[in-house]
Amino acid sequence: EYKALIKQNMGTVLGEGVIPELGQVKKGKVRDIYFSGGNVIMVASDRVSAFDYQIPNLIPYKGAVLNAITKFAFDNTKDIIQNAVVADEVDPNVVVQKALKNCGVECIVRGYMWGSMAGLYEKGERTICGLQVPDGLNRFQKFDVPLFTPTTKAEMGAHDENMTMAEVEALVGKPLAAKLKEVSLRLYQRGAELAAKQGLMFIDTKYEFGTDEAGNLYVIDEINTPDSSRLCDISEWETKYPQIAAEMRTGKYKNVTEVLAANPHLKIKEYSKQYVRDLLLEAGFKPGKTVPTLTEEQVIESSYRYIQVYERLTGLKWQFAGTPLPAPQRLMANLQRCGIAKGACVVIMAGSDSDMPHLEKIQSNLNKYFVPSHIRICSAHKQPTKLEEALNYYNRSIQPLLIVGCAGGTDALSGTASFHSVFPVVSCPPDGWNESCLKNPPGSSNAFCLRPDNVAKFACQTFSHVNPMFKNILLSSNEEKVLKLVKADKFH
């Protein structure tokens, strides 16, 4: 039943896209992050990364599931540490958190010999993140006490690197490093307790933290999700691990990887991204190579596993209640409903910063209509590549835009912009009546407004269908002007 519902909603996914009104996006592997008014607006997409590479497919409900699990985990760990959440009911794919200074450390806690650590161990490594790990351990074996194995927090496209505790102390200072370790271990313990109540084993996980101006520590981002953690069924581990350990004691195998190759039925099913990782490996993927595309069946299975984790961890049933709107339009509607966005934006583009007074005049008039805007300097003559890149960026917008081209002399900006942009372009030259922008060749479809105040009204009219506020401002403005004329007519 679930897989049939997932298949019906394969198109209900949130992938690439930007919301220019909220400012420049900081793109993570699977999240789009905007900084607005002292808050961080985090959009959890349905993108999936594995081995620090983004796979071509989108996984239905994945972003919403991660947000729902994080909400559950945050609600159940407030007694351990405060979290950064400001609002978590904006949209299934959106969480608003306080803007904090990221500590710059991925705080990983491991309860079992698993994942990348097990891979290093089987290759002979015995010092991992500065910790001395004894000989004689097996992949999947439980540690006597959970281990804190931090890594760097790499930018998109880079890889996280293991850190020693001394390196963490050098980065953030000894007191904060000790606090990060202590809180991470306590959060892991709570996660393990909650998972055990539902028959799940909490294998390992990672946490991120941030501090405010007063130095107060918060847990941020997501916690205890299948993207940041590994889980499996306790019953399966209790059944299979003793068999794996027994095979290792025979002396026939060098490590557990060889045991699994000979006995694939002993492989333990994970509730994590490992399913996706395994699919890529089975398809022959190696870092640096093209990432394989998953089949529809594999995408549905991935989505189903995410939903399974949510239901197992929380004890709640996943709600498929949907909306006829595609995910990007639903997201924008919800951002408007919560007052986070107005739903549209004007991009004022000029070829030179010498035109700034003209640009600021346009922006000032837009502010009178409460139309969001920002200014970009991109010369069509001197920076053609940058201009095209900027237009391609805005073409990914999930909200309506209006491009205002402001170039004097021979205006190549409005012609280039209106050719490349999927959104309307209006010219408003800084040097007044400039006919060059009226003589663009076929395919360059810009409009023309001579006055900055008319550009602002044109923008408000363009967006009047997007937000009732714009329509009401226009009607009110017109009514006010007519009323002023009536009052001025002494014979009325």
Image (cartoon, helix red, strand yellow):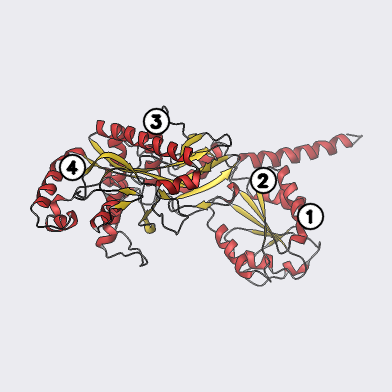
Which residue in the structure is indicated by mark 1? 357
Q: Are marks 4 and 1 in contact (CB under 8 Å)?
A: no
* 338 to the left or right of 476: left
Task: Indicate the quadrant containing the C terminus: top left, top right, bottom left or bottom right.
Answer: top right
- Tell which of 202 and 227 is nearer to you: 202
- Spatial CA distance of label 3 from label 4 is 26 Å
Specify which label sits upstream in the sequence, 2 or 4.
4
Q: Position of residue 223 (x, y in %)?
A: 39, 40
According to the picture, the residue beneath numbered tag 2 turns out to be 371
Q: Left or right of 301: which side holds 236?
A: left
Q: Position of residue 160 (x, y in %)?
A: 41, 54
User: How far separated are the C-alphas under marks 3 and 1?
Assistant: 51 Å
With 65 as the anchor, is 153 left or right in this view?
A: right
Alpha-carbon distance for marks 2 and 1? 19 Å
Determine the CA span between mark 4 and mark 1.
68 Å
Tell us which disc is closer to us: 3 or 2.
3
Relative image position of residue 124 (x, y in whole percent): 25, 57
Q: What kind of element bears circle 2? A: loop
Question: What residue type is disc 1 on?
Answer: Pro
- Disc 1: CA contacts within 10 A as few (<14), some (14-19) or many (>=20): few
Alpha carbon separation for disc pair 3 and 2: 40 Å
Residue carrying label 3: 77
- Comes first in the chain, label 3 or label 4: 3
SS class, disc 1: helix
Q: Earlier in the sequence, mark 3 or mark 2?
A: 3
> Which residue carries the number 4 mark?
237
- Given residues 425 and 290, the one toward you in this image is 290
- Mark 2 vs mark 4, CA separation in Å: 57 Å
Q: Is residue 71 above or below residue 5?
A: above
